[in-house]
Image: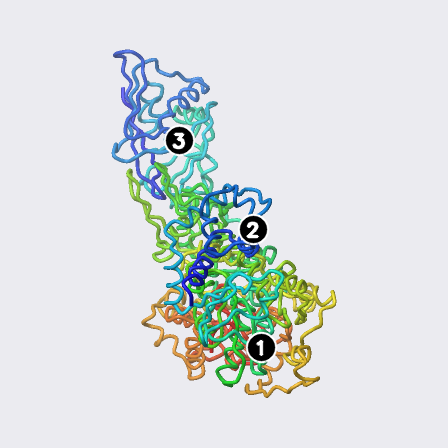
Amino acid sequence: MSGRARADLAALAALAGLPAMGPRRLLALLRDRRPVDAWALAVADDPATLRRALGGERDLATLARAWRAAADGVRPDALLRAHEAAGVAVLAHPSVLADPPATPGGPRYPQRLVDDPEPPAVLFARGGLVPDGPSVAVVGTRRCTGTGAGMARELGRELAAAGVHVVSGLALGIDGAAHRGALDARASHPEAAAPVGVVGSGLDVAYPARHRDLWEAVAAEGLLLGEAPLGARPAAWRFPCRNRLVAALADVVVVVESHVAGGSLHTVHEAIRRDVDVMVVPGSVRSPAAAGTNQLLAEGCPPVRDAGDVLVALGLVRGRRHRRVESRPAPGPDAAVVLDALGWEPATFEHLAVRCGLGLAELAVALEQLVADGWVSQHGGWYEQRASA
Amino acid sequence: MLGLVPSATLLGADGHAVTVEVHVTEGGLPSFSIVGLPDTSCREVRDRARAAIESSRLTWPVKRVTVNLAPPTVRKVGSGLDLAVAVALLVASGQLTAESVAGKAFLGELGLDGRVRPVPGTVCLTEVLGDAALVLPAESTEEARLAGDRVLHPVRSLGEVVACARGEEPWPTAGAAGPLPDPPPLPDLADVRGQPMARYALEVAAAGGHHLLMLGPPGAGKTMLASRLPSLLPPLSPAEAIETTRIHSAGGFGLPPGGLVRVPPFRAPHHGASSVALVGGGTSLMRPGEISAATNGVLFLDELAEFAPHVLDALRQPLEEGVVRVARAAATVAFPARFLLVAAMNPCPCGQGGQPGGCRCTEGARLRYQRRLSGPLLDRFDLRVEVQRPRPDDLFTSEPGEASSAVAERVLRAREQARSRGVRTNAELPAGRLDEVAPLDRAATDLLLSALRAGRLSARGLHRVRRVARTVADLAGHHGPIGAAHVALALSLRVDLTGATPHPESVAG
């Protein structure tokens, strides 16, 4: 790699870490400049020149000051070396850096993003090669039901097993469950497709912290991508940008559960901008967690009943519907009554007691057995049926 | 001239005998001084007594008046000594003879027109007056009777006292105590339709003395349920009735007709309550708080998470010991505080968070909300149930609710079982005795083991579940080792707080 290209790459990494440096601003700064010049300009505290570069933005004086302050103590070359030491590849968009210094065998800038209407000027990647082949984004609400999480995990598992890369945002709820499913598939079939996690913070800042293990597993089995350099905190503005990348990297976006105003609807919006198909898992009309997804169905998105529907949309199979092998012990007579009364909507112990007419003790025993055998999950006093163990 | 009259003052929930000494002399300029640790309201006796004396067509001595409240080491609070001061002053100024009031103690506050008003704590004050006949406000007669047999002279005004002392009228005497009127009926469990689990949780709470936390959205009937709990508890024993009555009397919480608190009290302080209002204290009054007023009954804290955290933390020691010790510079007092704690809260700020996928709160807001409750306090709740609004169709298809009296019978039998084990309730069973009094059969052990392995139960939670299972078995009239059904039910009565455990789909493996 030439020293000049290295310096440019280092400047790109440093630029991406400035506060409020969204993808659009970054591209504007880089329009007629080499990254090293853009870095020099960004941190010069020179609102007048910035105005010429960024156009008619309002409070440029404040922004210039903030960038100047944030640049204190940042040395681009040291930052680049830190990324190399941590095994994080810095990938530049071809229009920004014509001869990108490629690491043989490492990730390359994804082809799908090269032609994107709003591509990231620079990407940070941990893990293996950027996948070729079909990929599907499985997204949804953080505050999901057990049924939704179960569905996301099943989709993740079966899509990955069918050779489809599962792209998601590594968030709590649906996103995480989809990744867990893809990892399940990797654990049982080595040829299953690798998961792709797109995150809104530095690749070393696991967010949510509860998902640190998931980050590591996705990085080990697949690829972790982000637009922020190491150490960047998960600022709120980064998540919509993350959602656009999730949509841009997918052939199909599957929404499992979404409230009426959820972040996953933003992903849907970005997918529609890019002509990426959006498919939706139908939910109960009574479930607030499915209100947004059911709205999408009403607006004409095709439904997803299982992974087969997605594979058909991808053109991978024609109308194949596989039969699930049931490995759980069959429920006893009381348990069957309870399962029937439970149906596919969350219910409390009390709802079930009223509906199935069993005594409280019999009901408690039946539910304990159903939970132990994997038929039912229990969460904060609410019971939900599980589609698979 | 000197006047000596016995009376009593209240500190916490204990009476202290006080001798009111009044000295009147011609020497020096006319003045009025009062010594012997009076607080402000006590010091104001001067103005009340003067007006009352003049309204009663008696003479306020234009002389040097000294009032001493002996013993001078005990702080005197409130207006209960008014009548005694006025009578002693009349003796000291020669308007009454010492003999005419000998052997009589006086209690009561004076109005400016000379009327005699009741004061809080009559039960506790009367107890310490030895065998003196007691002249007291007529309204306090029933309360004073609870402190034992003695001669009572209920009066309505200072003028009446003077007339009796001068022999113009006979001292009025309290008639024989009539039978206590029936207490007003308590809210009945039969009013609750549906909600079988919440009803059962109340029954277990009442039978085993297990503290209960109800989680649920607004409008689920949590307050309605909690207020039915006193009707499930056994009526107070005579000793318990006196204990609770003393607190209610001393704290001015109001007494029922007949004076004696015979049904378990139900106290529901608002979540804005200060820690003094809740646990008791105050700078000089040392008044018992709501938790003591709930002694032998139910303390209901609605919107638990809205109480100030330091107020809730102040509950931990009394919950542990059954007694609250309030220490102030002036004195340290102990109040009984043995109550059944029932609390209700929304699962999250928006109130819908119990239902999976139903919550509109951010993750951070939920965590902040749940962090308001300290782990050690939550740990005290053996029973944690999710209470949902019953669905309208459930309301109509469900059986009509069982009445409180039927449930109370089962509760009584279960409590007798607990007493046979040497504790008041199963909640007090020491962990070391569980193997002896609450042995588990094979299936019950397996069930607990699988709950422990799945992380649904902690080692500490294990003891609590075993105690609850014991109560469940007692209620079912089951005497052998505890079975799987009892343990399963005990586990269902202990939901983890929302969000404490993730969906099984969102964890590895």
Evaluate whether residue B367 shows in this view: yes
* Residue name at image x 57 percent, y 42 percent: A58
* Residue name at image x 27 percent, y 19 percent: B1
Evaluate whether residue B186 shows in this view: no
Q: Which of B400 and B506 is in front in this view?
A: B506
Q: In this view, does B254 lie above or below B232?
A: above
Q: Which of A374 and A163 is in front in this view?
A: A163
Decide which of tag 2 and tag 3 comes sooner along the chain.
3
Quarter of the figure with residue A351:
bottom right
User: Which residue corresponds to mark 3?
Assistant: B79
Between the residue at mark 1 and the residue at mark 3, the CA separation in whole angstroms equals 69 Å
Q: Mark 1 lies on which chain?
A: A
User: Which residue corresponds to mark 2?
Assistant: B184
Query: Do circles 1 and 2 both sit on a common chain?
Result: no
Is the C terminus of chain A in the top left, top right, bottom left or bottom right quadrant?
bottom right
Which mark is on residue A386? 1
Mark 2 surroundings: few (<14), some (14-19) or many (≥20) residues within 10 A: few
Query: Do circles 2 and 3 both sit on a common chain?
Result: yes
Between the residue at mark 2 and the residue at mark 3, the CA separation in whole angstroms equals 31 Å
Between the residue at mark 1 and the residue at mark 2, the CA separation in whole angstroms equals 50 Å
Q: How many labels does the image show?
A: 3
Between disc 2 and disc 3, the foreground one is 3
Quarter of the figure with residue B69:
top left
Q: What residue type is labelled 1?
A: Arg
Q: In this view, does B398 lie above or below A185?
A: above
Q: Nearer the viewer, residue A62 or B124?
A: A62
Q: Which amino acid does label 2 sit on?
A: Pro
Residue B41, percent across and down? 38, 29
Indicate the secondary structure of the residue bearing disc 1: loop
Q: Disc 1, disc 2: CB below 8 Å?
A: no
Residue B427, percent across and down? 40, 65
